Amino acid sequence: MKIGFIGLGNMGGPMAANLSAAGHDVTGFDVAGVTVEGTAQAETAAKAAAGADVVITMLPNGAILRSVADEIIPAMQPGAVLLDCSTVDVDSARAVAAQAEAAGLGALDAPVSGGVGGATAGTLTFMVGGSDDAFAKAKPLFDIMGQKAVHCGPSGNGQAAKICNNMILGVTMIATCEAFALADKLGLDRQAMFDVVSTSSGYSWSMNAYCPAPGIGPKSPADNGYQPGFAADLMLKDLRLSQQAATSADADTPMGQAAMELYQRFVEDEDGSGKDFSAMLPRFEARTRS
Ligand code: NAD
């Protein structure tokens, strides 16, 4: 396939490289002038999009996606698919899809989980919103860039799945960290705590697969000085998107709201920026109740 790829950052760069290595004809564009081995570089986003069967975007936020979409949609050939893999707000995802479909294009929102490691290894999970036709057309590309693509329904539903998942993740990571800090103060050994909780009703991905306590459970960023992994800053971004969506849909999400406020304090007022999101554990450890 002829592919345009816009946004060649930490995630987009290795995703574009994998598509090119699999034999696709990839033309990339990034405002920062980044180049990716095996891909051609265009001078503008519109030039990268012109004549492509699929145009992939991997951009920082919804405002940038909307401005890039304004530029590339008129340049795309009829019947082509605009495949946005960025994590953005549900409203922007739906607005861009409507704009693309009105111009005779297919549109998919397909945010990912798996991080930079998954992007490099081609093992991302895609959560996809959009039509059956567009999903079928993009499926071979999902198979190269990832190990799983779940079609979640119409446009915006990929973003909805992503922010609901990450709202659960943020809340359970905080709960896991505060429980470890309480256990410490109660004199309960961390290994014993893990052995009980990981096989009892408190188990979760945060405890079992990504344990925030160093030296306990499978290897995780806690064993590497809380280097991300999944940065607290990115968790804050996703929690903000979940609260923006909750406001827009008039949904009551008190735990998601509390998690967003705590990560905001951690990242903006404390020392959480640049650390893994599981570094909430040393934060709680250092605190008292007041
Ligand atoms: P990044 O900042 O490394 O990359 C974004 C790229 O977009 C940059 O290279 C930037 O120069 C480029 N860009 C910005 N404006 C542009 C424009 N107008 N035209 C063309 N290029 C433009 O970010 P990333 O880590 O690659 O993340 C990309 C998206 O993936 C984000 O939405 C993020 O939330 C999501 N995501 C990231 C991770 C992760 O672990 N990094 C995991 C899951 C999802």
Image (cartoon, helix red, strand yellow):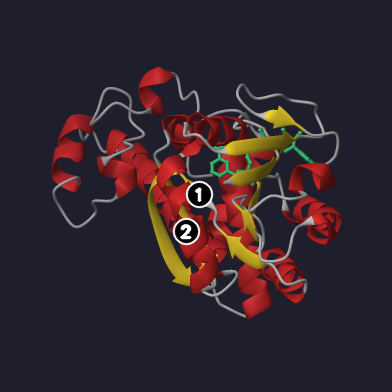
Residue furthest to the top in view is: 224
Amino acid, disc 1? Val
How many marks can you see?
2
Q: Within the displayed image, which quadrant is ligand 1 positioned in?
A: top right
Q: Position of residue 80 (x, y in %)?
A: 66, 60
Q: Earlier in the sequence, mark 1 or mark 2?
A: 1
Query: Between 93 and 73, which is closer to the camera in this rendering?
Result: 73
- Horizontal relation, residue 172 to residue 188: left or right: right
Q: For residue 109, what is the image quadrant?
A: bottom right
Res. 77 in view: yes
Can you give x and y, in whole percent of width and height, for residue 44 in the image?
Answer: 85, 39
Q: Secondary structure at mark 2?
A: strand
> Which amino acid does the dot numbered 2 rest on?
Met
The answer to whether mark 1 is within 8 Å of ligand 1 is yes
Q: Position of residue 153 (x, y in %)?
A: 48, 74
Quadrant for the C terminus, please. top right
Q: Nearer the viewer, residue 179 or 229?
A: 229
- For the point 15% across and 53% down, which residue is it? 200
Q: Which residue is mark 2?
A: 127
How many neighbours does mark 2 have within 10 angstroms: few (below 14), some (14-19), or many (20 or more)? many
Above or below for 222 versus 44:
above
Q: Is mark 2 within 8 Å of ligand 1?
A: no
Which residue is denoted by mark 1 in the rendering? 112
Of 91 and 85, nearer the camera is 85
Q: Are marks 1 and 2 in contact (CB under 8 Å)?
A: yes
Find the distance from the CA under tag 1 to the CA under tag 2. 6 Å
Q: Is residue 286 visible?
A: no
